[in-house]
Image (cartoon, helix red, strand yellow):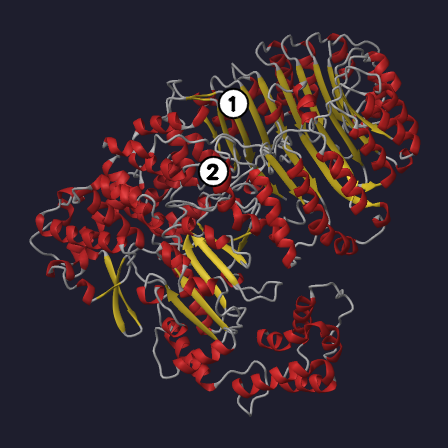
Amino acid sequence: MAAVTKIFTPSASHYMLVGAGLNVNVSDLMPIPGTAENCLIIVFERWFDANKGVNWDTLIKLCDDFADQLGKAKSNLLAYIGQSIPDNVTSISSIPDDVQGYADNMRKYYKHQPIVATDWPPRIGKDFFGRLALVEKQESSTQVESAWHLLLRGQVDEIVKLTENKEISVEDVLQPTDSSLSLRIVIDGSPGIGKTTLCRKLLNMWSNGTLVHQQYDLVLYCPLRDSKIATATILADLFEYKSSKVSKVVDWLSDRDGEGLLIIFDGWDELSEQLRQSSLAASIIHRKQLDQCSVIVTSRSYASSSLLKMDTLSRHVQVIGFSKEEISTVIIQTLQKDTKLAQELIDENTEQDEWLLKFAKYKSHFTTTQSSIDSQLAVKLINDLKVRNDVQSLCYVPLVCSMVILVYKEEGHLPTTLTQLYENFILQTIRRHVAIKPRHDIDPYTLGSLSSLPSQLAKPLQEMCQLAYTNLANTTMTFSSHQLQSLSEAVKEDYLGLMTTFMEYSKKKYQFLHLSIQEFLAAWWIAKHDKKTEEVFKNHFDYDHFRMCLSFVAGLTHLEHESYQQYFNKQLDLQCKREPLSGFETCHLSYFYQTPAEIRQYNHISSDYFDNVPILLFQLLYESQNTTLCQVLAQSINNHSLCLDRVSLSLFDWLCLSYCINNSNTTWNLLDLGKVPNQSLSVFTAGLTNNSLQTQCKRLEVVLGEHTDELIHKLLQSSLLYNIQECYCVLGYQGQYIPCLVLLQFLNLPQLKILHLIMTDHTKLTVDKTYYRDKCTELEKCIEMNSTLQEIKIQNNEITSTIISVIRGVTRNKTITSLTLDVPFDLIFFPFPSLPDGVIEQLLKNNNTLQALSLNIDDLLLPSSLNIVEVNTPLTALEIRRWSSKLITSLLPHIKGLHCLILDEPYPPYLLFLSHPSLHTLTLPLDTAESAIELFTILQTNATLKALSVEIKEERVYTSSMGSSLQDMITQNQTLKYLEIHNKWYIIFRSFLSFLTTGLRHNPSLQQLSVSIPLNERIRINFINVISQINNLKELNVNFGLDKSCSNCSEEEKRQVRTPLFYEQVLPAVTNMLQSHTNIRLLRIECWYIYYKSSQPNWMKLVQHLYATIFIHPSLEYIEIKTGRPVMYPAPPLLVDTLKDQKKTLIDRHRKEQPHKPLPIVVLR
């Protein structure tokens, strides 16, 4: 396929002709400039898929039939056939005999290689590697942070976010993608989780012909721990199995750019940083060489981040290990060797209730009636792990799970840290070694610890530890016999059982049982034998491949030396970074919420130059069990605010974080935990055991998924939240809870002042009606009697007894000043339970403290007899959203003196200002020209309104009289600071812009403008020129919308027209405006329907010029550029990659020229 495409690429412009000649459908391929090569690829893909006449003769005849157009292609074709294909072969897929012979030899070799390299520690589980999850590729601007820095790091924890990603089988790893490009697959996961075993499984499947997608002529397994592979410079160096055929195979593959070849690079993390940047492996992975071969790269998660940023990444697969239920199954099947008894034990503890079985396979507590000691031990371990959630969080890794079972069987208890686990396992390995080969009359069971070994064992262990450290420092993980010659005979006899041998292409080689074993032994050397432990720790701190080793050093030394404090007392800014509110949003939201900038659910932003959450430090603290350093780290975090939004945490990370917070002795001003899946929440809450009240949290933000009433109760009952004042919580993702009970738990927090609770997508639980009714009554009374709560926002998917109890409780409450009720209209709840009669009326009549009320309740959910006749509530702010015309018409006539009014339905402007002459903030839809003229005329002389947002709902609103009144309003009004003019359909009328532009020229007070303008050169230049001269303007939001002439175009036609206009007109205009306007602070640009991958040479220069202007601008703090609908189209690579390439230079220049100004935040969507 690749060879054929390459042959015809010079004639790509004739792809329609090629398709017709090959009887391929090309009617849907649009003649778009710059896409001919892609279309040609599609043509040949369809030809190969049809599999009719796919041979060289067909292509030669095609070239002969269209000699004038395909003459160059025929020359390339004949040259290729003459060089690469034997005379007697016409099939395009045939390969030379030498290549076939070498491939057959490799099949035989791989077939006889064991899938599992060693039997110690005992292998457990079905396939000896963890489950596989396909991770959905995300745009780089929102890509989850993947520089996971130590053991068990990665998105492996949660039965791993399998609600977002997809669990797959080993057969799916090499499934072809829709793209014509060869595959680039990254497989990552924790140490010991089975990445190498998975590679061996794939090799075995290829050898036996059971690989479903058997499209490879040859597969090369290239372990990067082998220095010859790591430092290879030519393709032949990757062929460890030498043969006289290698040179011919290499030539054949090189001529085909690697087509038909699959290379498995195992152990990317074992390469040095230099080799990750410049090596043959790196060149092939990044398509700089052999771009048509397919590649699998395995890596520990902490080192895979650079690979995941590749634009050509085909698939990201994580080896995610055992699920919580699988851990229980594996424990039973490992400890109970009698398969019948094991199955009976599994059946005995399998949940029998069909309804409960939907949520969990096993009962919450394991029991057994069996007298078998092994079965009883399995039950005890499973139940102990439920209590010791921290250790259970490590057991999803097969290697660690095996070690836990082994240690538990011998010791009868669970270790606290990984260091303790590995120390115990290595001790048992040495005991096993002594028992197998008795010597020196040593009883293996008298060996109590590694530190107290007799000299006959201590000295060999010391040699092994020195070997481990020296070679880890040199990134050497495999050894030849020659490299081990310096070891004593006592060591070389069988290396204390800590090393294994294997044959690699007729050569005997050695390696430690697992890389993590080498890392522990290296740590033992550093901690116990090196006189400069702290210096060695410092020298290796910034090296990725040393991080697990340093974690073990932390466990062995407890980081007690004072020099370790330097890593934990550096000032860190880990506060939430949020999209700045516009001036209008600030005016609006400040009436309803005490912290308006922080109430939006999805407004966090990320940037390369924000401080990263120091996961490594949390892990080191947990491993060291050093509570003093937990306090040192907490004090170094600015404002005692920690934001974990968009930070990917494993279960182990949650365990470490919980330990650090629990021992911080700090009052946290903010803990934003981000999205916390069910199992992660369980691990986190289990670690919050400090009841001294010295560790507190004032403000909590969290999004909980698949949670239960019990888990929420554990979180809220922790002493950490005893004095919490603000809580912003989202309950979603099919949680199993009863809203009424959950709300009661939140309201029982004694110091709570602000509660925002969003309850969506929960599973309705069956509950006794009398009990539920009593709880709703209790909720109503709880709200009524609450004397601390000031602000409450509740969102629920339907009108329930909970919502009714909230309204009734607030009606009689004496402290709540702000109430927001959001009940999104959802057809799935048909026939729509509605509010009972009198509930809204009583709230407005009897409450005398509410100052702000926001209601999003559809007319269908309101009582048919709604009749508001008396309003005594002292409202100053009112918001009525979402098709609530019934509420508007019934309520507004009875309210006077509002300062803020937000409506989603039209209302006569004259009546509004008659009742509310002192309005400061107004949102109002306009559906007629008359209502628009009335509003703008009133505002020409109004001296109180500061913020106005209008939405033009109908085309008929646009008249010259309306435009004139708008122009006069903008010209004459001297108090309006924030103006937003939205258009429902994003269709802009050119005449309207002339009125707006004229008004802006004469306005001295406007600070924020949000408006849509057509993507038209004359209007654009005129508008931008005016904007550039308005020095009082600090915020600008411009949507380059559709011109009236484009309103009926297809999406494809819109992209064809708008893409070049965006790069060649919009970006230069924005650049010029920034160069002229030195006071702008916030800038948002929207321009939809832009081709994702289109690029022209001159466009890059225009993008570079824009970025250069942004980073030297004297006042710009934030710029956002939207080029597509957020979910469907990520930001174009031209924008993203250019910024990535320029960023360091731009930042350096900014810091040199403007050292006291914060870096501008650039957000691309």
Crowding around mark 1 (Cα neighbors within 10 Å: few <14, some 14 to 19, many 20+) is many
Q: Estimate the spatial distance between the alpha carbons at disc 1 and disc 2, rounded to whole Å.
A: 37 Å
Q: Position of residue 337 (x, y in %)?
A: 34, 54
Relative horizontal placement of residue 1073, taking residue 487 as reference (left or right)? right
Of the numbered discs in the image, which one, if any, rests on residue 848?
A: none
Relative horizontal placement of residue 320, taking residue 979 as reference (left or right)? left
Q: Secondary structure at mark 1?
A: strand
- Closer to us: 132 or 1063: 1063
- Write the residue at 72% across / 30% down: 1030
- The quadrant the C terminus occupies is top right
In this figure, what is the number of numbered marks?
A: 2
- Is residue 96 in view from this perspective? yes
Q: Quadrant of residue 359?
A: top right
Relative horizontal placement of residue 847, taking residue 785 as reference (left or right)? right
- Closer to us: 1007 or 545: 1007
- Name which residue type carries label 2: Lys
Residue tagged by mark 1? Answer: 699
Crowding around mark 2 (Cα neighbors within 10 Å: few <14, some 14 to 19, many 20+) is few
Q: Secondary structure at mark 2?
A: helix
- Name which residue type carries label 1: Arg
Q: Quadrant of residue 799?
A: top right
Q: Position of residue 912 (x, y in %)?
A: 84, 17
Mark earlier in primary sequence (1, 2): 1
- Is residue 1016 in view from this perspective? no
Q: Is residue 1027 depicted above or below 1055 in this figure?
A: above
Residue tagged by mark 2? Answer: 1152
Q: Nearer the viewer, mark 1 or mark 2?
A: 2
